[in-house]
Image (cartoon, rainbow, N blue to C red):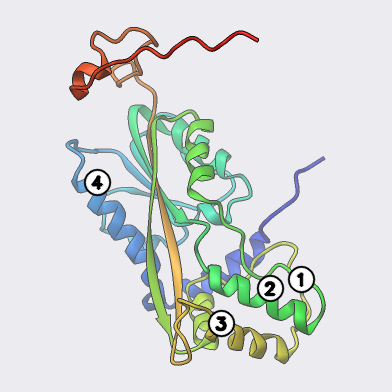
């Protein structure tokens, strides 16, 4: 029995094809690419066989030398042990199997190769999600999937561990974007290929009252901008890990410390009394 599908891959491909024709709308993808390159600049290492997994190859052209550009797909076109750097660029949130995506990237790395991923986290579009849910409950008395569910930073950090990457690190930052109103926000999402491509989405046309009510709720939310604009958070989670290698640092065996913590802190160590027996 096949697992349930999160994403309608055909709809997602259509959305991305439209977005590729309007590169000016891909500003969040450009921000993600800039973040990846800034982080690489701090790594004291030269990469000679990089690869980038992205749905928008034109955006990455020339950014990382002669890096191999790999289309985002369920099965990635990556050969085992072929790269010393693999970047998964702002597409993991649409994956039905994010662990499988990262495992494929790990297998494509040479020993001690570096994996860098960036994806949207759980705080992304939180006000929009809440406003649409509340409005739909009022207008139609039910809920339908309209905003992609996104993992939080702890779950994404666990993905690195489950994929078998060494020295896993997950950190996040939030970029707030201002729009004139809800309609402008939704146009922007569609323009960047982030429209609703959920497999279980409703295909029928939603009632006009739904979005009017959602806009009113969004305008009244604290921190969402008030009446003159809509402020939307986009959380970016950055994932870092390495292909296992014997040269990498490893945690010490418990009890093998050569110095006491109390000495390092300059404090006095006190022994706790034994717990009284019943």
The residue that appears at 50% across and 88% down in the rendered structure is: 181
In the image, residue 196 lies at what x, y percent? 63, 70
The residue beneath circle 3 is 218
Vertical side of 167 occupied by 216: above or below: below
Question: Are the two marked residues, 1 and 4, in contact with CB atoms closer than 8 angstroms?
Answer: no
Q: Nearer the viewer, residue 161 or 273?
A: 273
For marks 2 and 1 on the same chain, the one whose residue lies earlier in the sequence:
2
Q: CA distance from mark 4 to mark 3?
A: 38 Å
For marks 3 and 2 on the same chain, the one whose residue lies earlier in the sequence:
2
In the image, residue 274 lies at what x, y percent? 49, 9
Q: Nearer the viewer, residue 211 or 14?
A: 211
Q: CA distance from mark 1 to mark 4?
A: 42 Å
The residue beneath circle 2 is 133
The residue beneath circle 4 is 40
For marks 4 and 3 on the same chain, the one whose residue lies earlier in the sequence:
4
Q: Nearer the viewer, residue 125 or 225?
A: 225
Indicate which disc residue 143 carries. 1
Question: Are the two marked residues, 4 and 3, in contact with CB atoms closer than 8 angstroms?
Answer: no
Quadrant holding the N terminus = top right
């Amino acid at each position: 029995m096949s697992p349930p599908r999160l994403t309608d891959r055909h709809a997602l491909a259509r959305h991305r094809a439209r977005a590729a024709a309007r590169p000016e709308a891909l500003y969040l993808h450009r921000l993600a690419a800039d973040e990846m390159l800034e982080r690489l600049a701090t790594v004291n290492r030269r990469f000679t066989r990089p690869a980038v997994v992205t749905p928008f190859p034109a955006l990455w052209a020339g950014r990382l030398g002669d890096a191999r550009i790999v289309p985002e797909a369920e099965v990635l076109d990556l050969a085992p042990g072929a790269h010393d750097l693999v970047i998964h660029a702002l597409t993991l949130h649409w994956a039905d199997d994010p662990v499988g995506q990262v495992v494929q990237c790990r297998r494509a790395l040479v020993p001690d190769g570096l994996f860098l991923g960036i994806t949207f986290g759980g705080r992304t579009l939180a006000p929009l999600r809440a406003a649409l849910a509340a409005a739909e409950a009022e207008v139609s008395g039910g809920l339908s999937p309209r905003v992609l569910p996104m993992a939080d930073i702890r779950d994404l950090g666990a993905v690195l561990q489950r994929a078998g990457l060494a020295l896993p690190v997950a950190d996040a930052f939030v970029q707030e974007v201002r729009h004139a109103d809800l309609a402008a926000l939704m146009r922007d999402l569609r323009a960047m290929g982030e429209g609703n491509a959920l497999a279980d989405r409703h295909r029928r046309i939603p009632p006009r009252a739904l979005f009017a009510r959602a806009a009113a709720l969004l305008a009244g939310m604290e921190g969402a901008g008030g009446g003159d604009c809509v402020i939307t958070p986009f959380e970016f989670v950055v994932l870092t890990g390495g292909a296992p290698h014997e040269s990498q640092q490893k945690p010490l065996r418990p009890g093998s410390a050569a110095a006491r913590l109390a000495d390092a802190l300059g404090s006095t160590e006190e022994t706790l009394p034994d717990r009284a027996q019943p």
